[in-house]
């Protein structure tokens, strides 16, 4: 690697770290307004969302329906807090609208639906996103060969059988324009993963996918994984992301791993301070 | 003779008498009278010739859902996803998301019982252009409770924004393809496969979105029917005519949107109402008609012809249809029973 390429890579990583920190700020702002939320998951995938939206995804904030755009499908609709943060950071949603998150009449629902600008699908009924993504990837391949479909899904979501129906179809139809981003954060509704899903990477490989397994909170690892996924042909790609729920806010990183976090009003100042001082 | 959209050579769907056994997969009852083979697949292939947005999908039941004429002619637009009905519907939704118009097939039992959440959320919640054609509705197979979709229209009509059609014959089914293509949004259509009778005259009958069609007028009894039971309703009306009873037949192919105005008007013009459907008698057509009469403030004696609240056993299709009362004689008997009861009061 040349000196200048190395410096560019470092610059890109630093820029993405800045974006990730902004996403975390947006999420704390939204969750503070609600007093609760799926903030553990949102903070955990903030690094992935930053690299995805600001380095990898080809889209135009001014022309969201452009046909040959890349598409990001948030299958875990309850991670919407991360999606709204990314859409605001990308200039698709107004920052002040984030304050309406989860409130009556708000477009920014607790579980993402596809009527909000920038949200491609209605997620949240788990096990839907990958199948939708396969249909989009297979259907669009001959119409817009450059368009790629990115689908976020979670380790708990892999317990839905439809995930594997879609996984089989993706490799059978050689959907190499499809990238699954599998957030393995080790939590689900009833607590820590209640049904063991390991070995995650081997399962996806066994279903015919090109698999990478990375630290989902490492920006250099994320950049490299997206580069590798982009460079390979013939198979759908799975990136297994090992993420830490609550990442970037020390207190939340240490808190008992919970699917849905309720927070005392007095804690928010501390969380924001922790994020600014050390996190992200 | 062409009258009220009814084909002149329409005949009773009379199966060959000796075949009183459960037929194998793909075996067909022999049918007397005019038929069309694979009307769905032919209509889909014809539509695909003029609309390149159309894609076809199936879940390992292409041969048995008559999609072969399309799949043969447009192989590059056909996807067989294997035995995976949730993914069939999810992939179809994904196709619709990028502007294709997917027509997908499986059996009704799988499209409903297995894939319900995907029909509701992936398709209907996003108002996507997914057209589901679902085979073996009600008692059209002898394969027993695992394969008979006896409660499908009831389930599907509860999904907001989903159009639900139970076609009468080859004419209705072929036109359902065109109506589905011309109407934005998700469709669930009951599929009649193989040699499908021609009851409605394709030259004069027109399937219109959300509309019922009065095939015959009669002041004594209003028979409100859907699916292949409309053919039997017409036969029953003929039999009643011979006894001096005037029976009208209103064919209601759309369970949703439901043509409540036409049903109320039709029922108001008669002394009693008989509903006829190839479906359990609660949750489907009969329930819709009862709700409609109540909403309209109409009181009419009513009888419901359809299936009981029971999983049906294996057997020959004609044998099961006779046992569970889906015959024209059952409709006629219900009508005379209502009129006699009313006369005694």
Image (spheres, grey):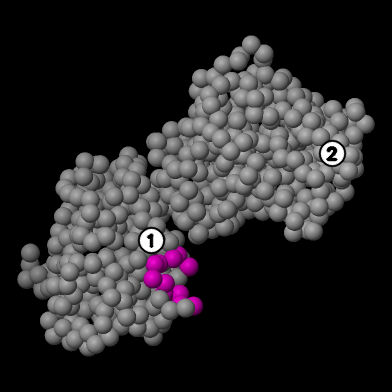
The residue nearer to you, when weighing A172 against B278, is B278
- Give percent across and percent down for residue B88: 44, 43
The secondary structure type at the circle numbered 1 is loop
Q: Is residue A111 magenta?
A: yes
Q: Nearer the viewer, mark 1 or mark 2?
A: 2
Q: Quadrant of residue B280?
A: top right
The residue nearer to you, when weighing B248 against A216, is B248
The residue nearer to you, when weighing B191 against B152, is B152
Regarding residue A177, the answer to whether it shows in the image is no
Which residue of the protein is positioned furthest toward the top in this rendering? B18
Q: What label sits on residue B341 in the rendered view?
A: 2
Q: What label sits on residue B20 in the rendered view?
A: none
Q: Is residue B142 magenta?
A: no
- Give percent across and percent down for residue B63: 50, 28
Q: Which residues are magenta?
A: A105-115
Report the side of B56 relative to B343 (left or right).
left
Q: Residues within 10 Å of mark 1 (few under 14, many from 20)?
A: many
- Give percent across and percent down for residue A242: 17, 60
> Split into 4 quadrants, where in the image is the N terminus of chain A?
bottom left
Above or below residue A126? Residue B238 is above
Q: Residues within 10 Å of mark 2 (few under 14, many from 20)?
A: few
The secondary structure type at the circle numbered 2 is helix
Q: Mark 2 belongs to which subunit? A: B
Q: Which residue is mark 1?
A: A124
Q: Label 1 to label 2, Cα distance in Å? A: 54 Å
- Give percent across and percent down for residue B156: 56, 48
Q: Quadrant of residue A22?
A: bottom left
Q: Look at 40% across and 36% down and name the residue there.
A: B83
Q: Look at 86% across and 42% down and name the residue there.
A: B342
> Split into 4 quadrants, where in the image is the C terminus of chain A?
bottom left
Report the side of B330 relative to A70 (left or right).
right
Q: Circles 1 and 2: CB distance less than 8 Å?
A: no
């Amino acid at each position: 690697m040349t000196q200048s390429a190395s410096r560019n890579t470092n610059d890109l990583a630093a820029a993405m770290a800045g974006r990730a920190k902004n996403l975390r700020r947006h999420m704390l702002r939204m969750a503070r307004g609600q007093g609760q939320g799926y903030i553990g998951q949102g903070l955990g995938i903030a690094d992935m969302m930053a690299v995805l939206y600001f380095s990898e995804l080809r889209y135009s904030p001014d022309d969201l329906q452009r046909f040959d755009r890349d598409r990001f499908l948030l299958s875990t609709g309850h991670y919407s807090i991360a999606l709204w943060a990314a859409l605001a950071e990308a200039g698709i949603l107004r920052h002040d609208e984030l304050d309406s998150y989860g409130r009556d009449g708000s477009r920014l629902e607790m579980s993402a639906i596809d009527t909000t600008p920038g949200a491609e699908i209605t997620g949240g009924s788990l096990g839907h996103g990958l199948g939708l993504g396969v249909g989009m990837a297979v259907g669009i391949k001959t119409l817009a060969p450059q368009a790629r479909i990115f689908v976020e899904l979670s380790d708990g979501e892999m317990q839905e059988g439809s995930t594997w129906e879609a996984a089989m179809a993706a490799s059978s139809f050689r959907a190499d324009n499809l990238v699954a981003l599998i957030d393995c954060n080790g939590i689900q509704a009833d607590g820590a993963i209640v049904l063991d899903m390991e070995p995650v990477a081997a399962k996806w490989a066994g279903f015919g996918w090109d698999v990478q397994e990375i630290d989902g909170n490492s920006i250099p690892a994320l950049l490299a994984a997206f580069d590798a996924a982009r460079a390979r042909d013939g198979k759908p790609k799975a990136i297994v992301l090992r993420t830490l729920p609550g990442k970037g806010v020390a207190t939340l990183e240490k808190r008992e791993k919970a699917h849905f976090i309720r927070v005392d009003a007095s804690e928010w100042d501390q969380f924001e301070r922790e994020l600014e001082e050390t996190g992200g | 003779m062409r009258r009220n959209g009814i084909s002149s050579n329409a005949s009773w769907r009379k199966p060959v008498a000796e075949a009183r056994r459960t037929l194998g997969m793909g075996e067909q009852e022999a049918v007397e009278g005019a038929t069309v083979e694979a009307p769905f697949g032919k209509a889909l292939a014809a539509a695909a010739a003029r609309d390149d947005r159309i894609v076809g999908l199936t879940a390992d039941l292409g041969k048995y859902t008559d999609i072969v004429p399309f799949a043969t002619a447009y192989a590059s637009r056909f996807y067989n996803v294997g035995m995976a009905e949730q993914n069939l519907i999810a992939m179809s939704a994904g196709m619709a998301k990028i502007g294709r118009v997917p027509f997908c097939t499986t059996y009704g039992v799988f499209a409903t019982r297995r894939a319900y959440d995907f029909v509701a959320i992936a398709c209907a919640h996003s108002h996507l252009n997914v057209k589901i054609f679902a085979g073996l509705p009600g008692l059209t197979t002898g394969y027993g409770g695992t394969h008979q979709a006896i409660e499908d229209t009831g389930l599907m009509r509860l999904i907001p924004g989903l159009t639900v059609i139970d076609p009468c014959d080859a004419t209705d089914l072929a036109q359902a393809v065109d109506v589905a293509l011309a109407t934005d949004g998700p469709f669930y259509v009951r599929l009649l496969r193989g040699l499908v009778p021609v009851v409605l005259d394709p030259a004069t009958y027109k399937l219109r979105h959300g509309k019922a069609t009065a095939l015959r007028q009669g002041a004594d009894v209003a028979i409100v029917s859907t699916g292949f039971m409309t053919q039997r309703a017409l036969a029953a009306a003929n039999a009643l005519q011979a006894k001096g009873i005037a029976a009208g037949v209103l064919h209601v192919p759309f369970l949703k949107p439901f043509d409540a105005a036409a049903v109320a008007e039709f029922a108001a013009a008669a002394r009693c109402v008989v509903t006829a459907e190839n479906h359990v008698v609660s949750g489907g057509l009969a329930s819709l008609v009862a709700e409609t009469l109540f909403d309209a403030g109409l009181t009419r004696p009513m009888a419901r012809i359809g299936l009981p609240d029971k999983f049906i056993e294996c057997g020959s299709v004609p044998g099961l249809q006779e046992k569970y009362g889906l015959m024209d004689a059952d409709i006629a008997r219900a009508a005379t029973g209502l009129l006699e009861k009313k006369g005694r009061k």
